[in-house]
Image: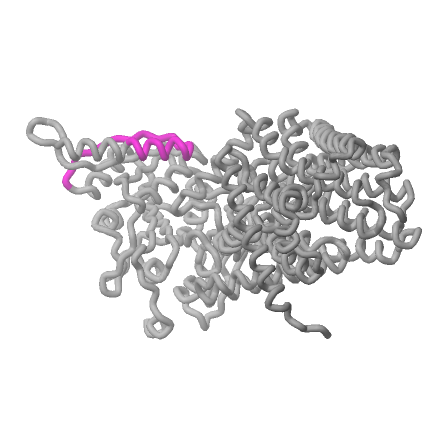
């Protein structure tokens, strides 16, 4: 075992080289962004500048000192880059929407096939007719042609991910298709590389090695999406249950990424594929939170990714292109690679009815071959399949396609916002990201059964996106709860049932479960108000204990069966963020079933002259305009008007009676007064005076201090 550390001089060279690469990559990246191009273009170019192509010719002594011909020195520098690409693929996997890809399944398959088969055919032709001067000394024409076919067919998932991420295209339909096809290209490309390596090394294919790769990858994917998913869920659940601990969460993500990366590398497929799958698995967990991956994204974008993309060009010597024959065939390979990938993707897209614009975007995106192509070229060089001339041609093609992809993609996408369905999906996702309570994440519904809880379930089903996962939580002796009745309300949704034993109280059980990654708690409440309580002891305690919004749905006294719809709802508007939470629920109800939404702003009484005070008038106009804008975005059937009254609750109650509303939706911030929750005078008065169905959105106090473990036990 050789555990000798690098010498002091080796460390100095390493740190200086890393500093130079990092600074150059960042400066070039910033320059590209200034002219409207993604930073990755400048980062790739930084390697060309620092390598033998430019700096190596201007000052070979400086290049020789910074990047010496020393295996240990090279290993240290390139290891930093590979860590970067591994982390980049984790973040990319986290952004990959398997549900969307599944819906686009036939398109993903067709584009993957077209973007692989057409470039393979072009590569075979180029490899067969290229002059013998480009062949390695120890290879045959057939092996060389197969290698070129593989090189032209592969795409670089890291470069594609970086380009899509920087251009804000990751969530577009074609962006997800590009990731899916890129992953397929990479997997098949690495398997093909193993096949060719067997031919090159032994004059025949090592079937045992190829079989290990194929069978192993199948087993890996099966494990990852079954037992692997459960292990990740268990780890993230443990982190959630222990409170907000980003260090522990990052540890779970990195452990998963490194473990999966080790497996895929052992299977002779790059570790980055395992990291990508790890990101997908983490994102699929119901205990995941996008905040978990933010530290990794920040670290990767700021440090590791620029180093990785810059080191990719350090081995390229563009000086070899001064040879006319090499230059000609470099152009031939570049044109063949670009056109075959472009038209292959276009053909695949057309086969499943995608538009030419979308097919072109896929063709441009998948053309980015980047640093993984350089790795393949390095493998070919080490196997003797390539020589210096063909190696330079392949690497130049990789760099050029990666640099051309962003500006070409920008041109192809200019003025194109996608299909109506895609635009609506993106707008919905954007809106959910900015919402306070209806955000599309999981919803917790504690219940003992009964009509109030079923009414709360109906509100959730009507107001929350259909992709929202629902967890029913029953406690103690509530095994008799008719869970099927709730499943009927939530028809077509994912519904989980969690049962907690009688040794745990309702409030404690809800608080513990709520830590595991929910957007909101929704609970039903009857009209019977117990003395000294706002609603009921349990509901009051849940509101005070919760660190996420609590939505209380109170049914009216005369309701003995679920309404099939709500005809008219009233929501007070005030411009405060808590009031917006009520607008969200009311707005989505209206959008879902056409409820007539009346948004009411209660302003000060008019003066003797019959007009509002100027300051109040301006504020009122602003509140009304913002409410109308939000209702329009939510797709609500709404009217907005102003009532002049000294007491807001009285004005809302009178409006509900006058308009014959069957629902009032209001919101307030939970504050503690003694042992009881306080939601503001307006909400408290509405709870006492309203006789229709009532929805109260209780948002947690932003200044709320979590009780210590000792205090929590005491309470």
Judge from the rendering whether residue 708 lies leftward or rightward of residue 53; answer left or right. left
Judge from the rendering whether residue 438 lies leftward or rightward of residue 388; answer left or right. left
Counting from the top left corner in percent of width and height, residue 166 is at 53, 40
Quadrant of the snapshot with the N terminus: bottom right
Q: How many marks?
A: 0
Can residue 225 be seen here? The reply is no
Q: Does residue 328 lie above or below 539 as drawn?
A: above
Query: As rendered, which of 493 and 140 lies closer to the eye?
Result: 140
Q: Does residue 156 lie above or below 628 as drawn?
A: below
Q: How is the image coloured?
A: one colour
Counting from the top left corner in percent of width and height, residue 150 is at 79, 42
Can residue 157 be seen here? The reply is yes
Counting from the top left corner in percent of width and height, residue 105 is at 68, 39
Counting from the top left corner in percent of width and height, residue 679 is at 26, 53
In the rendered structure, which segment of residues is drawn in magenta? Answer: 625-646
Residue depicted at x 66% and y 62%: 259
Asked whether 430 falls inside the magenta stretch, the response is no
Rendering quarter of residue 100: top right
Residue depicted at x 54% and y 54%: 19
Rendering quarter of residue 676: bottom left
Quadrant of the snapshot with the C terminus: bottom left
Q: Which residue appears farthest toward the right when viewing the image?
A: 203
Query: As rendered, which of 465 and 80 lies closer to the eye?
Result: 80
């Amino acid at each position: 075992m050789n555990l000798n550390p690098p010498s002091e001089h080796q460390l100095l060279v390493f740190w200086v080289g890393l500093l130079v690469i990092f600074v150059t990559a960042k400066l070039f990246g910033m320059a590209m962004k200034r002219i409207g191009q993604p930073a990755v273009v400048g980062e790739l170019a930084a390697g060309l500048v620092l390598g033998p192509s430019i700096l190596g010719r201007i000052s070979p002594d400086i290049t020789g000192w910074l990047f010496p011909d020393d295996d240990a020195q090279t290993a240290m520098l390139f290891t930093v880059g590979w860590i970067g690409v591994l982390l980049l693929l984790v973040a990319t996997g986290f952004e990959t929407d398997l549900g969307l890809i599944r819906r686009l399944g036939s398109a993903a398959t067709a584009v993957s096939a077209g973007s692989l088969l057409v470039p393979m055919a072009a590569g075979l032709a180029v490899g067969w007719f290229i002059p013998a001067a480009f062949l390695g000394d120890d290879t045959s024409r057939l092996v060389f042609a197969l290698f070129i076919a593989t090189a032209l067919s592969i795409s670089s998932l890291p470069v594609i991910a970086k380009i899509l991420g920087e251009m804000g295209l990751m969530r577009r339909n074609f962006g997800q298709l590009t990731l899916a096809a890129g992953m397929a290209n990479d997997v098949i490309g690495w398997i093909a590389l193993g096949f060719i390596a067997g031919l090159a090394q032994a004059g025949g294919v090592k079937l045992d090695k190829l079989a290990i790769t194929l069978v192993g990858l199948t087993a890996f994917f099966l494990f990852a999406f079954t037992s692997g998913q459960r292990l990740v869920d268990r780890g993230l659940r443990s982190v959630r249950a222990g409170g907000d601990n980003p260090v522990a969460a990052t540890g779970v993500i990195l452990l998963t990424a490194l473990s999966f990366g080790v497996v895929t590398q052992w299977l002779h497929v790059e570790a980055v594929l395992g990291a990508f799958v790890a990101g997908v698995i983490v994102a699929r967990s119901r205990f995941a939170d996008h905040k978990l991956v933010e530290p990794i994204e920040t670290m990767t974008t700021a440090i590791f990714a620029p180093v990785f993309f810059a080191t990719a060009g350090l081995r390229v010597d563009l000086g070899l292109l001064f040879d006319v024959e090499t230059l000609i065939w470099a152009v031939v390979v570049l044109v063949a690679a670009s056109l075959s990938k472009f038209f292959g993707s276009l053909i695949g897209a057309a086969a499943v009815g995608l538009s030419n614009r979308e097919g072109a975007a896929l063709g441009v995106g998948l053309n980015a071959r980047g640093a993984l192509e350089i790795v393949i070229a390095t493998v070919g060089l080490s196997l003797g399949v390539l020589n210096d001339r063909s190696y330079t041609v392949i690497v130049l093609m990789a760099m050029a396609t990666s640099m051309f992809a962003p500006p070409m993609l920008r041109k192809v996408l200019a003025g194109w916002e996608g299909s109506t369905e895609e635009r609506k999906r993106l707008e919905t996702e954007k809106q959910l990201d900015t919402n306070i309570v209806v955000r599309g994440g999981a919803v917790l519904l504690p219940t003992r059964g009964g009509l109030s809880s079923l009414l709360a379930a109906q509100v959730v089903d009507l107001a929350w996106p259909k992709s929202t996962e629902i967890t029913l939580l029953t406690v103690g002796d509530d095994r008799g709860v008719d869970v099927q009745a709730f499943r009927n309300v939530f028809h077509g949704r994912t519904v989980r049932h969690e049962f907690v034993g009688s040794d745990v109280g309702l409030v404690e059980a809800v608080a513990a479960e709520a830590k595991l990654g929910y957007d909101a708690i929704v609970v039903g409440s009857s009209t019977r108000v117990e003395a000294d309580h706002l609603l009921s002891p349990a509901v009051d305690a849940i509101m005070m204990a919760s660190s996420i919004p609590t939505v209380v749905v109170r049914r009216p006294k005369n309701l003995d069966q679920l309404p099939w719809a709500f005809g008219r709802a009233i929501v007070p508007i005030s411009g405060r963020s808590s009031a917006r939470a009520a607008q969200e629920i009311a707005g989505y109800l209206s959008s879902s079933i056409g409820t007539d939404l009346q948004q009411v702003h209660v302003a000060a009484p008019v003066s003797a002259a019959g007009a509002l005070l100027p300051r109040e008038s301006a504020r009122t106009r602003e509140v009304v305009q913002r409410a109308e804008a939000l209702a329009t975005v939510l797709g609500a059937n709404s009217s907005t008007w102003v009532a002049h009254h000294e007491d807001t609750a009285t004005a809302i109650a009178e409006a509900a009676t006058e308009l014959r509303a069957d629902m009032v939706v209001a919101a307030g911030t939970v504050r503690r007064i003694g042992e009881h929750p306080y939601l503001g005078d307006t909400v408290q008065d509405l709870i006492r005076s309203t006789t229709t169905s009532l929805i109260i959105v209780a948002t947690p106090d932003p200044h709320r201090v979590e009780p210590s473990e000792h205090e929590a036990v005491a309470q």
